[in-house]
Amino acid sequence: MGGARRETRQPHRPPSERPEKICAVCGRPFQWRKRWERVWDEVKYCSDACRRRRS
Protein backbone atom coordinates (compact mmCIF):
# COMPACT_ATOMS: atom_id res chain seq x y z
CA MET A 1 0.00 0.00 0.00
CA GLY A 2 1.16 3.56 -0.22
CA GLY A 3 0.52 6.42 -2.52
CA ALA A 4 2.46 7.39 -5.52
CA ARG A 5 5.59 9.29 -4.66
CA ARG A 6 5.91 12.75 -6.14
CA GLU A 7 9.36 13.43 -7.46
CA THR A 8 10.06 17.06 -6.53
CA ARG A 9 13.75 16.79 -5.71
CA GLN A 10 16.36 18.16 -8.03
CA PRO A 11 18.97 15.68 -9.23
CA HIS A 12 22.22 15.75 -7.29
CA ARG A 13 24.67 18.31 -8.62
CA PRO A 14 28.36 18.35 -7.79
CA PRO A 15 29.49 21.57 -6.08
CA SER A 16 31.09 22.87 -9.26
CA GLU A 17 27.67 22.90 -11.00
CA ARG A 18 25.59 24.54 -8.25
CA PRO A 19 24.20 28.06 -8.83
CA GLU A 20 26.21 30.87 -7.31
CA LYS A 21 25.45 34.43 -6.19
CA ILE A 22 27.47 37.35 -4.84
CA CYS A 23 26.72 38.51 -1.29
CA ALA A 24 25.19 42.02 -1.20
CA VAL A 25 27.25 42.94 1.90
CA CYS A 26 30.69 41.34 1.70
CA GLY A 27 30.86 40.78 -2.05
CA ARG A 28 31.99 37.16 -1.74
CA PRO A 29 30.48 34.43 -3.90
CA PHE A 30 28.31 31.81 -2.22
CA GLN A 31 26.67 28.68 -3.56
CA TRP A 32 23.15 27.28 -3.46
CA ARG A 33 22.24 25.33 -0.33
CA LYS A 34 19.50 22.77 0.15
CA ARG A 35 17.82 24.90 2.84
CA TRP A 36 17.49 27.75 0.31
CA GLU A 37 15.82 25.50 -2.28
CA ARG A 38 12.39 27.20 -2.15
CA VAL A 39 13.61 30.78 -1.66
CA TRP A 40 16.78 30.89 -3.78
CA ASP A 41 15.50 33.86 -5.82
CA GLU A 42 15.11 35.88 -2.59
CA VAL A 43 18.51 35.03 -1.03
CA LYS A 44 20.84 38.05 -0.98
CA TYR A 45 23.33 37.38 1.81
CA CYS A 46 25.87 34.59 2.33
CA SER A 47 25.28 34.30 6.08
CA ASP A 48 23.25 35.55 9.02
CA ALA A 49 26.21 37.74 10.02
CA CYS A 50 26.09 39.56 6.66
CA ARG A 51 22.31 39.83 6.85
CA ARG A 52 22.65 41.59 10.25
CA ARG A 53 25.42 43.90 8.93
CA ARG A 54 23.42 45.19 5.98
CA SER A 55 22.93 48.91 5.98
Image (cartoon, rainbow, N blue to C red):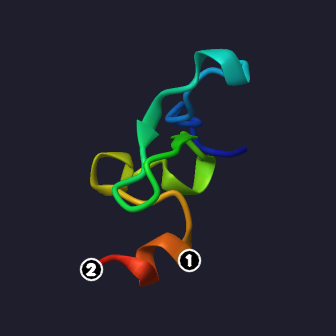
Residue identifier under label 2: 55
**Residue in the image at 46% along x and 57% along y:** 26
Q: What type is the residue that disc 1 sits on?
A: Ala
Q: What type is the residue that disc 2 sits on?
A: Ser
Secondary structure under tag 2 reads loop
Q: Could you say which is closer to the camera, residue 14 or residue 49? A: 49
Q: Quadrant of the N terminus?
A: top right
Determine the residue located farthest toward the bottom in the rendered image.
52
Question: Does residue 16 lie above or below 20 as drawn?
Answer: above
x and y percentages locating residue 32 in the rendered image: 54, 40
Residue identifier under label 1: 49
Q: Could you say which is closer to the camera, residue 9 or residue 17? A: 17
Q: Is residue 39 left or right of residue 17?
A: left
Question: Mark 1 or mark 2, which is nearer the start of the sequence?
Answer: 1
**Residue in the image at 55% along x and 27% along y:** 10
**Residue in the image at 39% along x and 62% along y:** 25
**Residue in the image at 58% along x and 57% along y:** 35
Give residue 28's mark: none
Tell me, yes or no, whether the two marked residues, 2 and 1, touch with CB atoms within 8 Å. Answer: no
Question: Does residue 8 lie above or below 44 as drawn?
Answer: above
